[in-house]
Amino acid sequence: MNNFIYENKTKVIFGKGGAKEYLRYLLEGYGETVMLAYGGGSIQKNGVYDEITAILTAAGKTVVEFPGIMPNPTYAKVQEGAKLARDNGVDFILAVGGGSVIDCCKIVAAQAVLDEDIWELEMDKHGTPARFLPMGSIVTVSGTGSEMNNGAVITNEEKKIKCGMLGAANDFALLDPSYTMSVPFTQVLSGAFDTLSHAMETYFGKPHDCNNLSDDLSEAVMRSVIANTRRLLAEPDSYEARSELMWASSMAENGILKIGKVTDFQCHQMEHQLGAYTDCNHGAGLAALHPVLYRHIYKEAAPKFKRFATRVWGIDPAGKSDEKVAAAGVEALADFIREIGLPASLREMGIPEDTDLAAIANSTNLTAGCCKKLSREEVLQIFQEAF
Amino acid sequence: MNNFIYENKTKVIFGKGGAKEYLRYLLEGYGETVMLAYGGGSIQKNGVYDEITAILTAAGKTVVEFPGIMPNPTYAKVQEGAKLARDNGVDFILAVGGGSVIDCCKIVAAQAVLDEDIWELEMDKHGTPARFLPMGSIVTVSGTGSEMNNGAVITNEEKKIKCGMLGAANDFALLDPSYTMSVPFTQVLSGAFDTLSHAMETYFGKPHDCNNLSDDLSEAVMRSVIANTRRLLAEPDSYEARSELMWASSMAENGILKIGKVTDFQCHQMEHQLGAYTDCNHGAGLAALHPVLYRHIYKEAAPKFKRFATRVWGIDPAGKSDEKVAAAGVEALADFIREIGLPASLREMGIPEDTDLAAIANSTNLTAGCCKKLSREEVLQIFQEAF
């Protein structure tokens, strides 16, 4: 086990009815002005908005609304939120939604109390914000695991860069699986795939040693996500499957699986630039790219991919070379993506034929490569093969 | 997934050299008087004491020593520590040792700032302490996982009760696997078995449903502990095996495995009273009792014990009834205990023949029983069969 430092102070309240039972108490001790942040208005249709605002009003809070946070939240939206927070003396940010809403609010929480530009601080000066407005989240769509870490993915439309930034961590996260019932089903599936991707990207980080508790735990998360995604396809309203997927989403990103690991998240890096150029759905982009990327790298980490094949996908290794077993695991992943109806290519995702893949490849962050160091040419080739 | 609330604020610093690199900074922001708590003096022989006191001195701390904390720490020792802390205006408690030292300090941290008697508050009035002295731990022997929760097991010698109490949680836990190198090897093994027991007692809690991420994670921890205990037997100085066991110990008790579970920890309840009457080693007591207890209860939870047999012990279920597979898992556990040289009976542990087993059974806390509700007669029978 490599040396590590681990700390995660987010309080998780999980289960049906959590907001009604606990939100009021969770907001005690913060100031009275609460920014209520949300997305495109689906919470106004499914009753969540009314439920939350009633609790805030009963708790004597002044509500400042910050609606309209888009999928792939933009840097411009962050600035809008930060100005709103400053102008209204916001004491606490309450994010209600999925990873996009939470990510946007994490950076708003930094920018609202920072004089300089947060993008310049983090991207140009490689600095980290020292202070944040306190925030909490009510999760209505799971997959990003954003509720339990301090990372946030923001798209700078002007610069055409979608990338991870460091922002506020949630003081609390309310996870109510019943809230996911009104989310479009494809979004639930792509969220589940995002979780699977987080576990895979962590698992294929270093070390590749097969004696590593973090990898054992990752395998458990992967198997659970696969099983419960299948269960959900059979029973779309299953609270049990939805609750398992919701907690797996947090488990994949609360830091526990990453303990002692060095990761590159190369598929996420590629998908982020695909998103910066096409505004595509994150989980769908990951689904289209993962098997293609893995076909390019599995031979360089065959023992680890073999373990993935046997322990996660149940491939029988008898009579096969390690490389053959490893390859079978990658194809099992590709089959699973088709099985659950996620796009198997960029074309299936609706990415236009004339998309400038070279520009996307050229702007992709090339990592050190835990399995294999990719060249820019190979990244372009992966995008082309994934089309 | 059942509803749950999860929060764990302990910062973990894991790895060789952690104290030298981080302890000084970890102690910033606390007052200057630090109580240095430890056990029977082994840290004075292996250099840990000198290393830590040098860091405390360099940090300008006034050190108040609280030595001599015994295995199975007593309520009298808690009172001694609390008085010492009050008399010397201690600002921070630094526990250096294993679970006994940490457990004792957790309750000292409560009693030192509490006017009434902590035993009366918790045991008689079923109250919980509201304030604690802040504390941190440097772990030299792992197994209890005490560094990452707020439970503490204290023996009231007068009342002949050894039981769990709620105490302070550590602000930080420094885990350095190299510190375990000088610990007696049987203690390392019994610590590993304590970890296995924590995961098993959690796993056999409710629900018994086979779709449960927490159970999947428990299985990963169990398999890792089994594999690394075996590895340690082959290579006693293996840093890798020791580091995996050390982190598994924390993982088993940081609350993650318990998420959504209701547990009874019936074997721990029985061992505690065995300890209260005989002052036996905790891990050894668990080893002697676990298989006997499980032979009494596995039929009532055969599907779960079957899963334990196949997934944790690799039992092939082909051609066997569920009950047969379940029984084979219990015997695999018993074989493992013999394989690693832990006592297979109370007699092997050196428990005197004339021990009043009836008194022990009569004072054991009988839980609701997640697999099977035990009668007092059956508990006595288990103790007798385990002899």
Image (cartoon, coloured by chain):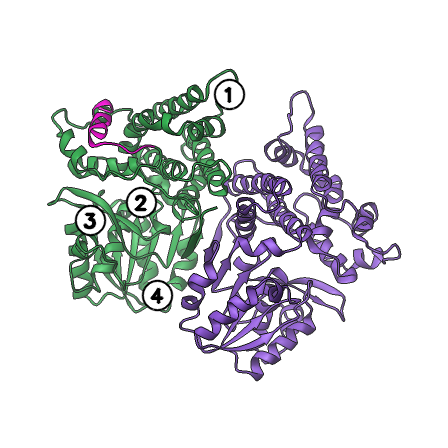
Chain colours: A purple, B green
At a point 45% along the width and 28% down the height, the residue shown is: B303
Front-lying residue, B56 or A234: A234
Q: What distance separates the C-alpha of mark 1 from that of mark 4?
A: 57 Å
Whole-percent x, y for residue A367 in the image: 69, 53
Which mark, residue B316? 1
Q: What distance separates the C-alpha of mark 4 from that of mark 2?
A: 22 Å
Whole-percent x, y for residue B29 in the image: 36, 69
Return the residue at label 2.
Answer: B46
Most distant residue in the right direction: A354
Q: Earlier in the sequence, mark 3 or mark 1?
A: 3
Which kind of residue does numbered mark 2 sit on?
Asn
Q: What distance separates the C-alpha of mark 1 from that of mark 2?
A: 45 Å
- Figure check: A81 above or below A203: below
- Figure check: A332 above or below B315: below
A316 sits to left or right of B123: right
At a point 35% along the width and 51% down the height, the residue shown is: B149
Q: Chain of mark 3?
A: B
Q: Earlier in the sequence, mark 3 or mark 2?
A: 2
The verdict on a common chain for dots 3 and 1 is: yes
Whole-percent x, y for residue B184 in the image: 30, 36
User: Mark 3, mark 2: which one is toward the viewer?
Assistant: 3
Whole-percent x, y for residue B287 in the image: 31, 30
At a point 19% along the width and 59% down the height, the residue shown is: B82
**What stretch of residues is rendered in magenta?**
B372-387
Which kind of residue does numbered mark 3 sit on?
Gly
Return the residue at label 3.
Answer: B68
Q: What distance separates the C-alpha of mark 3 from that of mark 1?
A: 49 Å
B312 sits to left or right of A338: left
Which mark, residue B59? 4
Q: Earlier in the sequence, mark 1 or mark 2?
A: 2
The verdict on a common chain for dots 4 and 2 is: yes
Q: What distance separates the C-alpha of mark 3 from that of mark 2?
A: 16 Å
